[in-house]
Image (spheres, grey):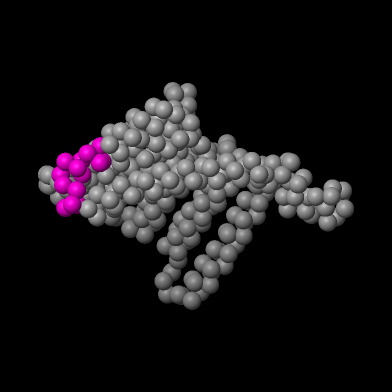
């Protein structure tokens, strides 16, 4: 849109209404697109408000509701969301119903654990929630629900590893927690990218792919920085280094495969700059602190400028 305004200022476009031209070309949202956005936002916000309202209703009236009424309200809420999907199918209202049912199921799991005090670790709550809600998330085919479900898997896995750390000490270290995130989000990224041929349709893939990529990149970057500064603390430092290189190469291929993935490439550049600066800082002499600081500052500036210039060229080539 800025290019249109620039051309209009240069006299290269003779049009009475540049904004209307932008709407005709799809560069600016028209009335119909705004209406669709407001409709989706209100529907999604309503489902979220109903789910949170259910949780607060049960929590605020714990004693007044009684045992059977608490369970009845939670179970009816779950069934109501499923009934909405049964009525409207894959339309927005049906998917919003499954989203509400997804939250209601979590409230039901928490209600069960709080009522009977089984003494199990909290990872059981999140694991059961993720397992029982998987059919609904699959039916909804919505990227928001898939992200919420993946968050449940992450929490359940991390809680389980902390719990097992009491038995097998190495499972509780930050290294293995990072490897767990790498495994889960790396697998999720592969499923999002190649799962359509097997019937996996998560809805909009762009920002679901980007969310998975950012978490995966953050985890492998932490492993790479640990290799640089504290390699003795890692069980398999060589595997962490190879994992970072493989993830960077695969992420570069993936981001270039999909146009308009500048955010993913920018994150990759930031990660590479952090690792390169860390390697240089590790190799420098500690006696000249001021000189080292000035050199590293200059190096960061140069690498950032080079990365910015490259990203601009990539963006222009993809337009």
The magenta region covers: 62-75
Counting every numbered tag in the picture gives 0
Q: Percent x, y for residue 282?
A: 42, 62
The residue at the far top in this view is 198
Seen at 67% across and 44% down, the residue is 30
Q: Percent x, y for residue 278?
A: 44, 60
In the rendered structure, the answer to whether residue 120 lies left or right of residue 35 reads left
Q: Is residue 280 above or below residue 126?
A: below
Q: Is residue 63 magenta?
A: yes
In the rendered structure, the answer to whether residue 42 lies left or right of residue 173 reads right
Q: Nearer the viewer, residue 290 or 168?
A: 168
Q: Is residue 34 above or below residue 6?
A: above
Q: Nearer the viewer, residue 103 or 217?
A: 103
The part of the image, by quadrant, that contains residue 212 is top left
In the rendered structure, the answer to whether residue 292 lies left or right of residue 259 reads left
Q: Nearer the viewer, residue 197 or 238?
A: 197
Seen at 30% across and 33% down, the residue is 79
């Amino acid at each position: 849109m800025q290019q249109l305004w620039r051309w209009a200022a240069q006299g290269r476009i003779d049009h009475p209404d540049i904004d209307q031209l932008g709407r005709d070309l799809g560069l600016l949202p028209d009335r119909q697109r705004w209406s669709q956005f407001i409709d989706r936002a209100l529907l999604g916000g309503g489902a979220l408000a109903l789910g949170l309202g259910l949780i607060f209703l049960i929590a605020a009236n714990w004693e007044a509701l009684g045992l059977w009424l608490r369970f009845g309200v939670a179970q009816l809420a779950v069934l109501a969301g499923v009934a909405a999907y049964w009525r409207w199918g894959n339309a927005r209202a049906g998917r919003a119903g499954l989203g509400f049912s997804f939250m209601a199921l979590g409230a039901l799991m928490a209600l069960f654990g709080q009522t009977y005090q089984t003494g199990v670790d909290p990872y059981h709550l999140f694991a059961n929630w993720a397992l029982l809600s998987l059919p609904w998330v699959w039916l909804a085919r919505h990227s928001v629900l898939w992200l919420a479900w993946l968050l449940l898997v992450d929490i359940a896995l991390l809680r389980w590893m902390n719990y097992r750390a009491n038995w097998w000490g190495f499972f509780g270290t930050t290294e293995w927690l990072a490897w767990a995130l790498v495994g889960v989000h790396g697998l999720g990224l592969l499923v999002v990218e190649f799962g359509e041929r097997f019937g996996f349709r998560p809805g909009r893939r762009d920002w679901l792919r980007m969310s998975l990529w950012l978490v995966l990149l953050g985890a492998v970057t932490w492993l790479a920085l640990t290799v640089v500064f504290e390699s003795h603390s890692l069980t398999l430092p060589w595997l962490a280094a190879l994992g970072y290189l493989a993830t960077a190469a695969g992420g570069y291929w993936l981001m270039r495969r999909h146009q308009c993935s500048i955010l993913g490439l920018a994150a990759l550049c930031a990660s590479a700059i952090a690792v390169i600066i860390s390697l240089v800082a590790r190799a420098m002499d500690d006696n000249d602190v001021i000189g080292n600081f000035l050199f590293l500052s200059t190096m960061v500036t140069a690498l950032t400028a080079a990365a910015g210039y490259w990203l601009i060229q990539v963006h222009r080539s993809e337009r």
